[in-house]
Image (cartoon, rainbow, N blue to C red):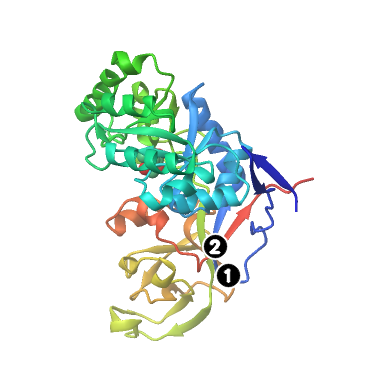
Amino acid sequence: MGRCSLEGQNFKLQDTSFISRKPSQHPSWIEIDLPQLRRNISIVRSFIGNKLYCLPVKANAYGHGLLEVALEAQRAKVDYLAVAHLKEAAKLREAGIVIPILVLGAIHEDQIESLIRWNVEFTISSRYKAELTEKICAQKGIKARVHLEVDTGMQRTGVRAATAPDLFQFLKASPHFDLVGIYSHMVFSDTPDHEFSSEQIKIFNKLLQNPLLKEARLVRHMANSGAILNYPSAHFDMVRPSFLTLGYAPKSQNIDGLAPCFSLKAKVSYCKTVEAGSGISYGHTFRTHKQTKIITIPVGYGDGYRRALSNQGYVLIKGRRYPIVGTICMDQFMVDVGSDQVHVGEEVVLIGKQGDQEISLQELATLCKTIPYEMLCQFNDRIPRIYKDEPTL
Ligand SMILES: *Cc1c(COP(=O)(O)O)cnc(C)c1O
């Protein structure tokens, strides 16, 4: 097997044969439109100018596929990837991803050596974590590439701005740290002109003006998707937009050319005509008013398709909308198609476009009383991901 070297370590040369491109035998699938993903990446680029582009691909790239999205990002010259956990970073390196990776989540003592061996940058969010890291680096004779996280109001992880200069000095003075960056995270980035956002940006800026930090060459970063659009003053040296890259504008703003690259599809598994007054599915929560055709879709809450959509959601068949009837089961649910002709095996769109109709992620999220982010993360790996690309000539 071919190998490439990254700072003395050996990694598998990229073998992309694991990427599924063929139609699925399984009767449901998530389709990822790679050309659209690439268009989104270049649109984000046009918003951020010469800033570094860091793409967080945590949580299986919001359900889109960790490795597939990372490889596409690397090919599209995205500068950095970010993940929440060591496990995700290790998977990326194992697959041959060579661009910088930053672990955003708080790290644990037993992970430090692996983080460094995988050549992954990670977050120092407290003095305690810094001392643990230093101790392990000293024992092993290794050096950590780290970003200092500053809490400007999220109260999640990160040192307070007031104690950041101290920790900065500690990291700078130690031979075991390469301090690469400093960052924070915004609370209200989706809301334009929010007072608290200005407050967070102000706190971060003030810290960066501290004479100690001012001279340091650090990658300063703060902006996620919302802040790319709403807070240009939070762009600093690097931005971290995932949601936007995947084609979703916060608050469903319309951005020319930007579009989701994710759709959920299935094949009709069963059709029958039922009489008026027939109860449908568990508990008979729906009853037919007239003779009608009921079809079965082989997707359920066991795939991550939410039970909250029972008697609420819609699907698209031949470019028309049909209502979900009855409760959603673990592996299937039913749809009322009236007197229309629908055949077993016919393609159904659960999320995405068909003809000029669309079932948007936002629509389903609203019905489920949640946010599109959670909707994307809920689909598990029983549903295969299929990657559609332009045919190569
Ligand atoms: C997940 C995450 C992001 C990406 O957020 P989007 O809203 O999807 O752009 C950015 N920064 C941090 C710290 C994150 O955890």
300 in relation to 122, above or below: below
Residue 261 appears in the figure: yes
Q: Quadrant of residue 311?
A: bottom left
Q: Which residue is mark 2?
A: 318
Residue at 51% over, 21% down: 50
Most foreground residue, 104 or 176:
176
Q: Which residue is mark 1?
A: 346
Q: Is residue 75 left or right of residue 224?
A: right
Residue at 35% over, 81% down: 281
Q: Is residue 306 left or right of residue 72?
A: left
Locate residue 390, reporting x and y percent. 69, 47
For marks 2 and 1, give the CA distance. Answer: 9 Å
355 in relation to 74, above or below: below
- Residues at circles 2 and 1 in contact by the CB criterion of under 8 Å: yes
Q: Quadrant of the N terminus?
A: bottom right
Residue at 40% over, 53% down: 110
Locate residue 197, reporting x and y percent. 25, 29
